[in-house]
Amino acid sequence: MGIRNGETYLASLHDDRQVIYEERHLDDVTHETGFSRTAQAVAQFYDFQSLPANVELMTFQTPDGDRAGMAFKEALSKDDLRSRAAAYAAWAEVTCGFMGRSPDYMNTLLTTLGTVSPLLAQVDPVLARRSRDLYLDARRRDLCYTHTFAEPFKVVPAHGDRPTPSCRVVAESSEGLVISGARSLATLAPFANMNFDLPGGAWYERQGTPYLCGFVTPVAASGLRWICRDKFTDVNDADSPLAGRFDEMDCVAIFEKCLIPWDHVYMFAPLSVETPGMEFVMAGLQHHVLIRSIAKVRFLLGLAHLTAESSRVNQFINIQERLGEIVFWLRTLEALAVAAVEDAYLEPVTNTYHPNPQVTEIAGVWCAQIFPKIIDHVLAIGGSRHMSTTQPGTIELLGDLAEQYLHGYGSDAAATAALFRLAWEVAGSTWGSRQGLYERFHFGDETLRKVNGYLRYDTSQAVAMVRRILSDAPGSDKVFPLPVAGKGAAG
């Protein structure tokens, strides 16, 4: 089928999906106030990749002769990783990094899952084939995926108590698995075609043995409802320059005896069985986040610089230090992006390249740490100007008075108000707060990720360096004892 354009994508949203907002089912998210602009934003992605000038950048030719989005490209070389990163960066530049769940994000996950299917064959050849088929189907139809990954209101049980999962397999038959319960956090769900439920989402015991389940299902599947959070704005772009253009919308998925056909179950194995290749799936996702984050931090740097310049506080060293910190964080992300590809991992079974899992994990934690600090800098640099910005209509009403008292350095009153309205939307609005939560938690708790990074890290080379210095080397003509080959030596 090849790549879609925006019109084809929007047409795909006209189905039987059950999207619920304020006690009613939304008949058509492409025309619903507060939703339609997001549908148009996703459609713009498909139009962007279809532009003749962007086809080579954003797409590639498949072995079948069709063209597919670059996120669907399996990496047989580091150049393939570079091509994917360039496509991520091109779209992130359009959205200034604020579309966290653009279609290429989940498409990267499907691609990696399909790529590592030979590893999954070590667990179950049937599951491996399904994983590969799901990837090829998504690539062929150019699908837009959301994903669910957590229980929405999980309560940690008391010591010794057994947890009662909110989502579970309630039946198993020759047709497939039947799922009931709730899952979150389905970002972009009202605007997606398919949902990918990450492994472990649905609790199941088969003859007393707990099983790990992972599945995909159409957003419009029978027995599946999507419960929306509050929308953030119904106003136009001028009054709300970012939220008025785009709000990804986050949902809780409610499964009510929802049948998942076996060919949509990509993971079904005892919990005790190690699932190979999942670290590469996460690395692919985190690589996309890293590239997108570079665009977002660059935008925030520009925003902070302009607000400082407008108020002329950029002459003060404390403000320059804040701006300098943002520059350092941006340059660090850029360096991590280079390292993720140049130190890519060549998986020997599949003979495919993957962004370095350790580098991308570090980048993910780094992003979670720096975004709140950047927002704090934006607030501090703007100061009280964030609280005294007037509306565009008021500036027009005031006329010359506005130009006399409300202008900024080098900009008129209207441009100054627009700049600070944008800064407030990013740093102080409900839309901006949601952005902060997304960046902070969408890969899980920061502390646990740091702990896991330490526990998984091979410390042998670091320990060998310390032990070499502590070792006694009498009679040596070297000031420093030399490394022993294979025990911390260079190379």
Image (cartoon, rainbow, N blue to C red):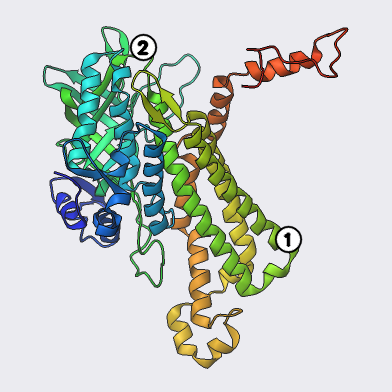
Q: Which of the 4 image quadrants contains residue 169?
A: top left
> Residue 382: percent from the left, percent from the top?
61, 66
88 up-or-down from 245: above or below: above
- Which residue is at the front of the view, 180 or 187? 187
Q: Secondary structure at mark 2?
A: loop
Residue at image mark 1:
318
Position of residue 202 measured from the top left corner of the image (x, y, whole percent): 30, 24
Looking at the image, residue 183 lies above or below residue 188: above
Q: Give the residue pinned by disc 2.
A: 273
**Left or right for 416, reference 12:** right
Quadrant that contains the C terminus: top right
Q: Amino acid at mark 1?
A: Asn
In percent of width and height, residue 45 lies at: 29, 54
The extreme front residue here reads 477
| In this picture, residue 152 sits left or right of residue 389 | left
Query: Which residue is pictured at 18% across the width and 30% down the height?
Result: 258
Residue 466 position by quadrant: top right
